[in-house]
Image (tube, grey):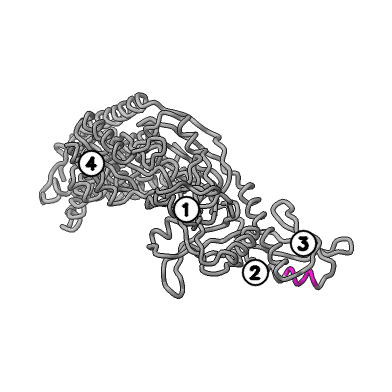
Amino acid sequence: MNRYPVWKYAIIVIALLVGVVYTLPNFFGEAPAIQVASVKATVTVDAALQQRVETALADADVQPLSIALENGSIRARFDKEDEQLKAKGVIERVLIPDSSDPSYVVALNLISRSPAWLTALHAKPMYLGLDLRGGVHFTLQVDMQAALTKRTEALTSDVRLALRDKKIRHGGVNREGQSLEVRLQDEATATTVRNLIADTMPDLQANVVSSGGAYVVRASIKPESLRSVQEQALKQNITTLHNRINELGVAEPVIQQQGSDRIVVQLPGVQDPAQAKDILGRTATLEVRMVDDSSDARAAEMGTGPVPFGSEKYSDPHGQSIVVKKQVILTGENLNDAQPGFDSQTHEATVNLTLDGKGASIFKDVTRENIGKRMAILLFEKGKGQVVTAPVIRSEIGGGRVQISGSMSTKEASDTSLLLRAGSLAAPMEIIEEYTIGPSMGKENVEAGIKSIVGGFIAIAVFMCIYYMIFGVVSTIALGVNVLLLLAILSMLQATLTLPGIAAMALAIGVAIDSNVLINERVREELRAGASPQAAIHAGYEHAWHTILDSNVTTLIVGLALLAFGSGPVRGFAVVHCIGILTSMFSAVFFSRGLVNLWYGRRKKLKSVSIGQVWKPEGEDVRSVASAKR
């Protein structure tokens, strides 16, 4: 009756092993480390750079505990802080010869001391939020109207270009809010224009309106395209922020969407909000210029001559010099999109650009006049420019769609597309919330949170063991397993633990023990009713399960609502709360019954169970569970 099959005990053992393995990294603490990240969007951090760092440290007789390339940055871990500081100086001398124009940022950091075998199993500690580690928090409001206006302006230029190419006479193309209007003299021409817009511009929906003897084709962006524009603007801004925050050397920044038009940026460890605001608000510009192919320019690139008048020298991502003309052909304002792709004939990786109407017209004229010459695409940030790519013009390019190709890998094509899209913000942003938490306060919060959880756990354990005896001991062990599994799952999900999360963890302990109280009291009721100890255990778990399930499901619904509609600290609380409910149902019912079955299930002639004092109804004798008999 009260025996588990082997496969159930196997599940319990596996759950415990997984829980121990993925909880362990949280107890090893953090070691001083160095993080090397790219400052410039066109500079990549790869295995070759890691080799340079390893060689520099070896030459300086600095031995890191470990060094690895993770998430686009190099992280070297050291045993002591003085080794960390020495390594920082060594790496900066090698990677940043010119401090006025750094390509990399070498930042002091802290990373887990977890042993290699745990790291190999992808067992990592939870991240600590701002309230537990200190740092700065920003909530940014994205100006979606500006993004939609920018897109409408681009479509208005495209319509003008299309009408000019088709040689259709009109009375003007004007933008009115988030729509555009084309004035025409007759209905037939208006119908032609409407059909042209429908065939060539899938983002627009157009209709013909009669106004004062004239006809107006009014076009507006389709609802699904409006959502796409907003999503792209938000995505591009988030990508741009990721690129910029690398300069701050933050190990685990939190940059996430909040609602439909807000971005939350959390920078643990950063204590200078002014510097952070400068990085977040920085602007980048894109320019297209012609490469200077004169002999004087070639000499300037080789370093054997001066740069010709009217030209400037820049470097490409590989460090090679390229002399380009000062005249700007196009800017990033003329670029609507950039996506990686493949050439249908050569199957080479390509970058496909989409220009607005004005840009397409200029590009067509320039490419027709400069076939066989090189065109450079430059990215300017903080007043300093770098050549992203400099392809050769093979033929006249019209229609506003440009394909860049030539000896690039799929990853390089993807990276270049990202740079061209994310060089600047797609829409303006305004900081609507900002606060800073000091590291000492974060440390105090961690200590207070741990004390509250441990204190609550001990108090509950003492009460349960005194009041329910052996069943109380089983409940306490199950409660410990619940905390173990909760920490393991949070670590596996790489969740960010915040102060509300610690509060939810303390609440999870109370919710979990409540389930065991229901079970124990149900067993007592069965014993008072005269059931045998084995039958009382079986009936207690079976009947209490339905009540436990109902109460936990209703609580879980509230947690899911907080997770779906909450934000910031509320979501942090909800995540731990929901996971805690699921782990408590496993530990309080499945695991605790396994222990009870292991202790009592094999006794065929069980005469009593240790579950504290069992009180009979008034008027009957009182007997202890120690003497509870059939």
Q: Residue type at mark 4: give it.
A: Ala
Residue linked to disc 1: 297
For badge 3, the amino acid type reads Val
Q: Nearer the viewer, residue 21 or 424?
A: 424
Q: CA distance from mark 1 to mark 2?
A: 42 Å
Location of residue 553 with respect to 441 vertically, above or below: below
Q: Which residues are magenta?
A: 189-194
Amino acid type indicated by mark 2:
Thr
Taking the image as shown, residue 404 lies to the left or right of residue 475, namely: right
Quadrant of the snapshot with the N terminus: bottom left
Callout in the foreground (4, 2): 4
| Residue 540, image x, y percentages | 26, 47
Mark in the foreground, 1 or 2: 1
Q: Are marks 4 and 1 in contact (CB under 8 Å)?
A: no
Left or right: where 362 falls relative to 611? right
Give the residue number, with chain letter if any, for mark 4: 56
Cα distance in 3D space between marks 2 and 3: 16 Å
Secondary element at tag 3? strand
SS at mark 2? helix
Q: Earlier in the sequence, mark 2 or mark 3?
A: 3
Residue carrying label 2: 200
In the picture as drawn, the residue positioned furthest to the right comes out as 213
In depth, the one of 15 and 489 nearer the eye is 489
Q: Residue at x 56, y 51 (%)?
A: 332
C-alpha span from label 4 to label 1: 35 Å
| Residue 223, x across and y down, in percent | 63, 58
